[in-house]
Image (cartoon, grey):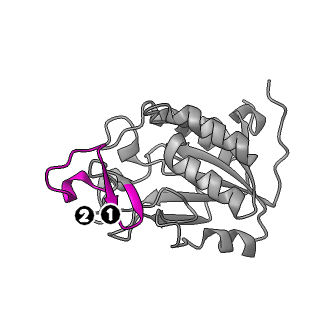
Amino acid sequence: MTPQIEVGDSDVLLVIDVQIDFCPGGRLAVPHGDEVVPLINRIARRIKHVVLTQDWHPQEHLSFASAHPGRKPFESVTVPYGTQVLWPDHCVQGTRGAEFHPDLRIPHAELILRKGFRPAIDSYSAFHENDRKTRTGLAGYLRERGLTRVLLAGLALDYCVRYSAEDAVRAGFATTVIVDACRGIDGDGSVAETHRSFAALGVVSVNADAVARP
């Protein structure tokens, strides 16, 4: 069993994109994505400070394959900030798919951070948009609150969780990923590459029972 992590007032749980479109039956479903919900609920009960992120795209967002005639989902194109994977339309503002999973129960969450709402920039990380210049303001918010360690869970491990964890480290936060409270897309070995990146950056990987045992 994983040694218990002591959580306190300087810790924050960052719950990444646990939304209907990323769960089975959604427009961009992560395999078994809904399985993280009960774990995240249990973990959140142990942690005083919680931030939820929410993908929040306008229609015809740059990252949608439908915005690029002749292109299909999961192809890549070059945009002003680099390579962009094209996705099915998902998490469109005001749609059911953009809502949080209905079984997510975190009434004490202190902030909902919406990302990906700028039409011409995708946003995986909770800290920076994909141009790597546009900040979300999350780092400043956490510092103002005196929060020094970020624990992450959610969807998808090899995209939004990964980018958020990497940026948390670069912003100077101690960073822990609760890996069994995440699910990945795992295209072309992306989950294995994510774990290699975490090890190189000093991101701590634990299971949920380290934070909240049954």
* Residue 57 quadrant: bottom left
* Residue 49 appears in view: no
| Closer to the camera in the image, 193 or 212 | 193
* Residue 82 quadrant: bottom left
Mark 2 falls on what kind of element? loop
From the viewer's perspective, is 199 left or right of 92? right
Mark 1 in CB contact with mark 2 (< 8 angstroms): yes
Residue 207 forms part of the magenta stretch? no
Residue 78 forms part of the magenta stretch? yes
- Give the magenta-colored segment's residue range: 63-83
Residue at far left of view: 70
Q: Residue at x 47, y 67 (%)?
A: 131
Residue 122 rendering spot, x and y as whole percentages: 40, 61
Q: Nearer the viewer, mark 1 or mark 2?
A: 2
Q: Which residue is mark 1?
A: 93
The quadrant of the image that shows the C terminus is: top right
